[in-house]
Amino acid sequence: MVRVAPSLLAANFSNLAWEIAKVENGGASWLHYDVMDGHFVPNISFGYSILNDVRKVTSLTLDVHLMVENPNEFVEKFIANGADYITFHIESMTNERQIARLIDYLHIKGVKAGLSIKPSTPVDAIKPYLNKLDLVLVMSVEPGFGGQAFNPVALEKIELLAKLKKEKGYKYIIEVDGGINGQTIDSVKKAGVEMVVAGSYIFGSDNYQQAIESLK
Ligand code: DX5
Ligand code: ZN
């Protein structure tokens, strides 16, 4: 059984509290919060002030996915405004020591730390950090937009992460993000995923509870 993190990116922003209540009552475990800066990805979403409002209306774990060019500059604000997990992209970091330092910083601040890889980035790129991580986010679409088609390149990465986790006793949660729906869910489950992000599949459905349950 996997857990489900609806991606707020696909929600109706004019009715956010209601949208959140519906997924919370519908069996969501986490709320996935996509932050885009228009530089790391060619799109802009929302920032930490909306996270603060979201924090006030839900007790769900807030899973912040930073798609920004310089995560170091922003983590403080997201921590202060209610993030439980903060995941940044390996591709947004230039210096290895900086990556380890940011993970340690999140832990010092009492926040869980995640690293994400784009479809073109291999698991090898994050291997040195796996022992420190609480979450690994495998992108199954190019980050930037909801509603894209699932890229099966994610499957072998999930399998490898599950294998390494078992072999080495790592504690990270394996999460997949992008193109998850009733058709693609079985393949990621089979590969060993533990948390699935889904945006358009849930918020585009008539019944959020049914959509969430169908992924579990
Ligand atoms: C894409 C985001 C995803 C997005 C997923 O850059 O990271 O979280 O909301 O949307 P769907 O589920 O519609 O592919
Ligand atoms: Zn995301």
Image (spheres, rainbow, N blue to C red):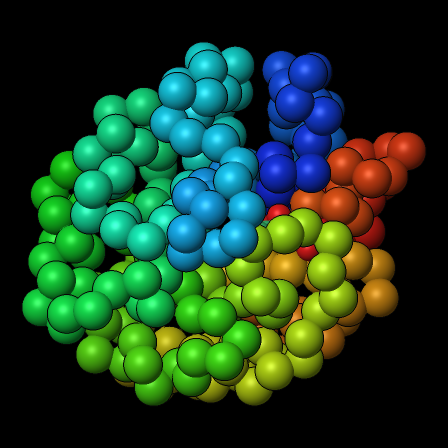
Q: Is residue 2 left or right of residue 84?
A: right
Q: Residue at x 37, y 27 (%)?
A: 48
Quadrant of the image containing the N terminus:
bottom right
Instruction: Count up the numbered dots.
Output: 0
201 in relation to 78, above or below: below
Q: Residue 92: x, y in percent?
A: 31, 62
**Displayed quadrant of residue 23:** top right
Residue 55 seen in render: no
Quadrant of the image containing the C terminus:
bottom right
Residue 12 seen in render: yes
Q: Residue 12: x, y in percent?
A: 72, 25
Q: Is residue 139 left or right of residue 167?
A: right
207 in relation to 132, above or below: above
**Displayed quadrant of residue 52:** top left
182 in relation to 108, above or below: below
Q: Is residue 112 left or right of residue 151?
A: left
Q: Residue furthest right?
A: 206
Q: Residue at x 64, y 60 (%)?
A: 178
Q: Residue 13: x, y in percent?
A: 65, 23
Q: Residue 42: x, y in percent?
A: 53, 53
Q: Residue at x 43, y 70 (%)?
A: 117
User: Which sits in the foreground, 142 or 136?
Assistant: 142
